[in-house]
Image (cartoon, grey):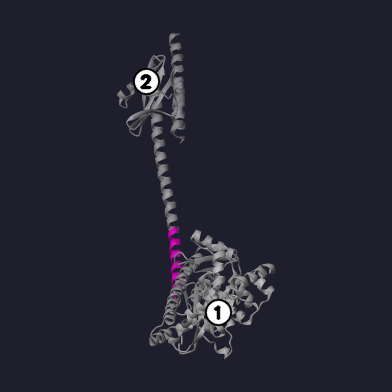
Amino acid sequence: MTLMVAGIVGTSQTREQLSSLRALVVVGMMMFRGGGAEEILRLAMTSVPSLCRGWTHAIHLVDGDDLQPSVVGSPRPPDPALFDLAGAEGPVPVEGAAWGRALPLSGLGRSRGYLVVGADGEPSEEERFLLRVLAEEAGAALATAALVAEQQLQADELRRLSDRLAGANAQLTKSVSDLERRSAVHETLNRVPATGDRAAGIVAAVHELTGLPVVAEDRFGNVLAWSGPSRTKPVRKVSARQRADVLGRAQRDGRPVRDRDRLVALAQPRDAVLGVLSLIDAERTAGPHEVLALELGATMLAMELAHRQGVAEVELRLRRDLVEDLISGTDEDGAVTRARALGVDLHRSHRVVVVRGRPGIGDEAVANAVLHAARGLDAGSLIARRSGSVILLANRPAGWGDEHRWHEIHAAVSRHLRSSAVSIGVGGHCERPADFPRSWQQAERALAIRQRSRNPEGITAYEDLGLYRVLSDSDGDAEVDRFVREWLGALLDYDTQHHSEMVRTLSTYLDCGGNYDETAAGMSIHRSTLRYRLQRIREVSGFDLGDVDHRLNLHVATRAWNLMAEPG
């Protein structure tokens, strides 16, 4: 009976052991299926109660020279006794347990941590064996997972390196292609002739590179050159405000900007915009290579326009210096030689023309208008600016014959200025360089008289001055001054004391032939005011305005006073 019970008991224990072994094999298989460290440790932790009458107290993993709580189980710090085991199995205190054991998680020849198990009593030898196998399986699984993770990292790094190499190869291919395109752009633009109309050559080269119509304009929007499949020049009128907005955007961005159907690049060698180069791109097909050709073309156009401007400024300075020397008096042979170098024949008959705009009209605008007008009339191009005036050395256009047609200069200047508010004086003939100082003085006299007249806007030639030519003779200045004081002295003193305009009223009245309405309108006063002033003039001066001699002398005196007075 005892042997039968023992056999039954032995058979029961064997079945339990076999069952535990099978469970351990299953757990091991699950650990090695690649779930990662966290799943391995969780399987180890939850498998302990099925292998013995105990529990998992903690799992600690090696972290360099230290032990750290794992991501599963209790987060309690490792017991100091663990450090004394140095990777071997051994007893450790477990709170609330009669028996505690640290089982190394060994794998691939080194310990990866500890599985700390606690129990109410010491487990059997078979149970301890199963716990050791569990810990070794967990250690081996952790080592395998680490190796797989490392291999995965290496594979990922190799894949990233391969991707980078592929990207670098693609970038290299693109860079070679871009370099070839850039070389083609440079080669084409470098074929632009060094002489002749370089703006036209630049535009033609950019059109060849892009296949798009191209137009070069100055800063005002005037077409300098164009190239394209259409026979019609791509002229487009825009307002000054719209143009300023486009130029401002291009300056701020520092690159070509879109302006409706155009891609616009600035020809700007330094701070000043000298012009623009535009692609006509209504379909918006321009890509990076077209933009590159446009930018390089704009750079070349900027250099060309800067060169033109520099040449023009040098020539303008030479012309200005020659004008200054001629009206001041200079060596005749030297002046003729310098003029010939500038394309001017001083052996032709010339006159000095002095032009002055009213306040508010810039000197540069007046100078440009005079130059355009003179060239348009074939009247010369020697100009200078002095003391708010523009001086032109004008020859009589061939088409004028002997006619007196100097008013056409005023009309042409007015057209270019879009204003007739300019006064012009014309001096006498200059047959040789020594005559220019005299002609300039005569032009200044004619201009002064024109400015002091009732209609300052217009042109006056010296030969038309009549009585003023006698009054303006510098040799008689003292006598003229005495004459003016004799006839107008009392009125001049009255005006000074009372801040009135008696002399000016008298001058206007006499210039208007004694017409009350014209005089009142010219003075912008009422007829009754004019009547009062004329009465005061009679009383203060003591002269009778109805007397022919008095009237004549007073008229001559007011003309002389006008000539000597500063322009109003």
- Horizontally, residue 94 falls left or right of residue 293, namely left
Residue 497 x/y as whole percent = 55, 65
What residue is shown at x 43% (from left), y 33% (from top)? 37
Amino acid of disc 2? Arg
Q: Quadrant of residue 435?
A: bottom left
Pick the residue in front: 167 or 113: 167
- Horizontally, residue 188 falls left or right of residue 408, namely left
- Horizontally, residue 377 falls left or right of residue 16, namely right
Amino acid of disc 1? Ala
Q: Nearer the viewer, mark 2 or mark 1?
A: 1
Pick the residue in front: 448 or 377: 448
Residue 54 x/y as whole percent = 43, 18
Q: Quadrant of the C terminus?
A: bottom right
- From the viewer's perspective, is residue 203 above or below residue 87? below
187 within the magenta span: yes
Give the alpha-carbon distance from disc 2 to disc 1, as whole Å: 113 Å
Q: Which residue is mark 1?
A: 373
Q: Quadrant of residue 98?
A: top left
Looking at the rendered structure, the secondary structure element under dot 2 is strand
What residue is shown at x 44% (from left), y 58% (from top)? 171
Q: Which residue is mark 2?
A: 101
Question: Magenta part of the protein: which range?
Answer: 171-191
